[in-house]
Amino acid sequence: KMLSTKGNKPAGIVIHHTATYNLNSTVNYFKKNVVDVQFVLGHDGKIIQMVPCNKTAAHAGKSEWNGKKWLNNSYIGIEVVNIGWLKKKGNKFYDGYKRLWKGEVRERKAEGFKYWEPFTAAQEKELLELCVWLVKEYDIPIENIAAHFEVSPGRKNDPAGGLSMSFDQFRNSVRSRVFQT
């Protein structure tokens, strides 16, 4: 049984990275476990909706943003398939599971780490489009779009360095698309 969000209208959006490798295994994991989210976004830009936008999903945990606490009840969660932070040892990179990383690496100091798997161009494009649509569809204030590290500071670091821009720049990109004439 899914709980409805207060008033059945989402108040905001929290963006995460999955710390996983691919869309299918992520979706299967979420289906089998307590974690769930409204949307999961694959490397190729494919979006899977797992929970209706007016239903509560367990994605933000202990969180607070713009005066609201425990955002699961009122914020839409978007998980971007991405391994997240990477550690450099010598000239090699390793993910959080201590596996050798052979993919692209973005160097950007953010949330205590210096190296990250970058979001793909398709992920950034579709994430922007999805956020623009959600803002328009549910009249969500732009300032209520947040990164998981912003709503759970000191506890979470996602999606910090995955985006090619800061989170303020991402919000500004959404704003400019929403208010285009």
Image (tube, rainbow, N blue to C red):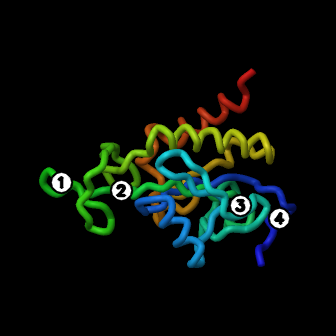
Residue named by callout 3: 68
Q: Which residue is mark 4?
A: 6
Q: Which residue is mark 1?
A: 92
Q: Secondary structure at mark 2?
A: strand
Upstream in the sequence, badge 3 or badge 2? 3
Looking at the rendered structure, the kind of residue marked 1 is Lys
Residue at 52 percent of width and 72 percent of height: 29
Dot 4 amino acid type: Lys
The Cα–Cα distance between marks 4 and 1, rounded to whole angstroms, is: 47 Å
Quadrant position of residue 100: bottom left
Q: Earlier in the sequence, mark 4 or mark 1?
A: 4
Residue count near mark 2 (Cα–Cα under 10 Å), binned few <14, some 14–19, many ≥20 = many
Specify the quadrant of the image occupied by residue 111: bottom left
**Hey, what amino acid is under mark 2?**
Trp
Residue 55, horizontal then vertical, whole percent:
76, 66
User: In this image, 141 relative to 86: left or right?
Assistant: right
User: On the image, numbered disc 2 is attached to which residue?
Assistant: 85
Give the CA distance from mark 2 to mark 4: 34 Å
Q: 7 or 41: which is nearer to us?
A: 41
* Spatial CA span between label 2 and label 1: 14 Å
Q: Are marks 2 and 1 in contact (CB under 8 Å)?
A: no
